[in-house]
Amino acid sequence: MTNRILVVSGESDIRNHIKLVLTKSGYAVETACDGLEALRQLERAVYAGMLLEIHMPEMNGLETLPQARRLYPSLPIVMMTGNPKKEILDQVLAEGAKEVLFYPLEPERVQQVAELWFEVAQAGNGCVSRMIHARRRLFLALLGVVAFTLWVFQFTFRKFETVAVRARIHRRIAFHGLRERELFKILLFPFNILLM
């Protein structure tokens, strides 16, 4: 589990203030100065959550939020702003932000938000991790079964090497409109679902 938080703000004073508060609370804090840098950092590491300022240069929070939600749907994102316009607040909450913090940021409020949203995310990530490992084990077991089935299938074809038997099997496959490649696609269909 990670306790790493990404703080994204165009103001270095705000980034440093939040980093100081959260570091004292035991979090590992990384910072970004705009949305583009934030998305790059999200690709490189796993975070328990992100504090994202709405108004920034380059790529602002309103542009970053939907992209981050699309790429990392389980990442809790808390927005920050000094401009409490109702339209903007409704928009960010509708796009998946967990909460909106208003400037000036009080240290106690920042700690509360981190404990509320980011520690819940950490607990959930452990469950997700266990689920992923269970799916991986199930996939490998099923892959072994399919490999064994295909080996038996090949062995059966080799055992009956007569032209008549092979022709009869190919006619049956052709009668149903299937080629050998399509037959293998049908056999492997359950694994495609598991990989989604």
Image (cartoon, rainbow, N blue to C red):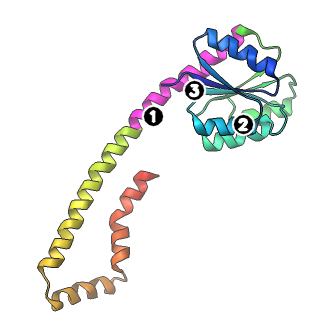
Q: Amino acid at mark 1?
A: Val
**Residue 27 at x, y percent in the picture:** 59, 16
Residue 114 on the magenta segment? yes
Tell me which residue sits at (66%, 39%) in the image: 40
Given the current orientation, which residue lies at the most extreme bottom position?
Answer: 164
User: Which mark is drawn over residue 37?
Assistant: 2
Q: Which residues are magenta?
A: 108-131
**Residue 14 at x, y percent in the picture:** 79, 18
Report the mark closest to the observer, 3 or 1.
3
The quarter of the picture where residue 73 lies is: top right
User: Which mark is drawn over residue 96?
Assistant: none
**Residue 184 at x, y percent in the picture:** 34, 70
Report the mark closest to the observer, 3 or 2.
2
Query: Going from the N terminus, do you reach mark 3 or mark 1 first?
Result: 3
Residue holding disc 1: 128
Q: Is residue 190 left or right of residue 70?
A: left
The quarter of the picture where residue 95 lies is: top right
Using the image, determine if residue 97 lies above or below residue 114. Answer: below
Q: Amino acid at mark 3?
A: Ala
Label pair 1/2, CB-CB below 8 angstroms: no
Tell me which residue sits at (36%, 68%) in the image: 186
Residue holding disc 3: 48
Tell me which residue sits at (64%, 44%) in the image: 70
Q: Is residue 122 left or right of residue 82?
A: left
Cα separation, mark 3 vs mark 2, equals 17 Å
The quarter of the picture where residue 165 lies is: bottom left
Q: Nearer the viewer, residue 111 or 190?
A: 111
Query: Going from the N terminus, do you reach mark 1 or mark 2 first?
Result: 2
Q: Residues within 10 Å of mark 1 (few under 14, many from 20)?
A: few
Report the mark closest to the observer, 1 or 2.
2
